Image (spheres, grey):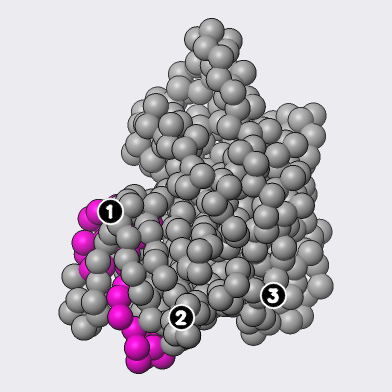
Amino acid sequence: MELEFYGAAREVTGSCHILRINGKTVLLDCGMFQGRRSDTDRKNRTLPVPVSEIDSVVLSHAHIDHSGRLPFLVTQGYTKTVWATAATRDLCAVMLADSAHIQEKDAEFLAKRHKEFVEPLYGMKHVVRTLELMVGVPYNKPFDVVPGVRGTYVDAGHILGSASVMLDCTEGGETKRLVFSGDIGRWGLAIIRDPVPPVDAHELIMESTYGDRDHESVDGARARLAEVIRDTAARGGRVLIPAFAVGRTQEIVYNLHSLIRESAIPSIPIYIDSPLAIDTTTVFELHPEVFDQSEDMVKKVKELFDFPLVHYTRDVEESKALAHMRGPMVIIAASGMAEAGRILHHLAQGASDPRNTILIVGFQAEHTLGRRIVEKAAMLRIFGEEVPLRADVEVINGYSAHADRTELGKWIDAVGAGSPNLKGVHLVHGEISAQDALKTALLAKGFSVNNPEPHTRIAF
Ligand SMILES: [Zn+2]
């Protein structure tokens, strides 16, 4: 039995690892490399092994850096099974379609701007074919990946449907359990359950995204959200929230709903101005079986995402009409880093009004408009126009879906306690500084740890 590290090895995106056993080859994730096109395009068009050799794919969750190259596998002729939880499969239906749309638009843009012909990485027909290959399985129910490999998903507590996978690998009469953490979530996140640390691992592939820092607490984030809404409403302003459509939008809507029920914030209208966020919310509503049943609101409320104050604006005319409305309101729109999408229209119109608040709830990469806002630049450039930034800017870091340093420690402690035969911990999915910090912490706890380079192979 052999494991090879391929994508998200010493980096964050492109999650993909290769398991070889009994003459078969299994991919764990098939994610997109994200970043500058010049750095990632060739990597995204290169398969880890020839497609004819791949016998099965086991997917951890729907985020594009884990699932985004599945349709590309299909363009290369892949026709076998892709395993996922049922909620992951349904989220992929929405997210891969969006990704195909982006690929096609990018190719069109390059053709127009640079007279450069680029074949899109894949299109909608490949997404449809991918969905045909995806088989949804529940948590805790074993499934046969290839002869000699039995998989079981447990909840990773990261986004809807996210999983860690335990792979019981049998070769030559010997069985070893390989565990792939996927992305590890947080304890106490709204709607979704807490992470379930796997047990009886022999080898562990573990993510390390925030191995070097701690977040604001989940409860702290909710309290700050309430404060921002109260203050802005008192000024008669709008709260503009750039947010990714999947996960964070639903979490904030759920938090707003619970705050309204507690009368902790005034009853002001909330607009979800994003077709992708609306589609994703529909997928959430289809999967109450994976909601955290210990949460009071999940137990008591039938319509979690649909309450009198929330409005979902799908078409462009409705979106434009928001500009002419008066009075305090909350607007949540993509993109999360304010680089594109409907949030730009709201910022162009609202950033200069000191009554408004721009609320940043996610990581803002360098060279993005979101980063300029966080840095409180005096002027913002939106649609080629200079807009003075006079709105209040607030940042809440507690809405991350990733475990922080302390939570990763809690997770590995539980895995270690339940895995007397754990031999090696292989850190992936993190920048070098985060991996080094986590490695030092895990070595101090007595684990055998490495952070493998791409193409490193280990026999187990
Ligand atoms: Zn993720």
> Which mark is on residue 188?
none
Q: Judge depth for marks 2 and 1 and give the one in front.
A: 2
For the point 22% across and 64% down, the residue is 437
Residue 345 placement, left or right of 388 = right
Q: Which circle's residue, 2 or 3, is located before the other in the chain? A: 3
Q: Is residue 99 above or below residue 210?
A: above
Return the mark for residue 172. Answer: 2
> Where on the picture, by quarter, is residue 290?
bottom right
- Label whose residue precedes the other's in the sequence (2 or 1): 2
Mark 2 burial class by Cα count in 10 Å: few <14, some 14-19, many 20+: few
Q: Which residue is mark 3?
A: 138
Q: Secondary structure at mark 2?
A: loop
Q: Given the image, on which type of amino acid does mark 3 rest? A: Pro
> Would you say the beta carbon of the disc 2 residue lies within 8 angstroms of ligand 1?
no
Left or right? Give the position of 214 relative to 268: left
Camera-near label (1 vs 3) is 1
In the rendered image, residue 310 lying in the magenta stretch gets the answer: no
Give the alpha-carbon distance from disc 1 to disc 3, as whole Å. Answer: 33 Å
Residue 369 relative to residue 190: left or right: left
Q: How far across and how far down the image is residue 363, in percent?
A: 42, 48
Q: Residue at x 46, y 80 (%)?
A: 172
Residue 330 vs residue 192, the one in the foreground: 192
Which residue is labeled 1 in the image?
453
Q: Is residue 106 left or right of residue 49?
A: right
Q: Which residue occupies the extreme top position in the image? A: 115
Displayed quadrant of residue 415: bottom left
Dot 2 and dot 1 residues touching (CB under 8 Å): no
Tell me which residue sits at (39%, 52%) in the image.
6
Badge 3, how many Cα within 10 Å: few under 14, some, many 20+? some
- From the top left corner, tell me how far across and down residue 22 is, in percent: 50, 69
Q: Mark 1 falls on what kind of element?
A: loop
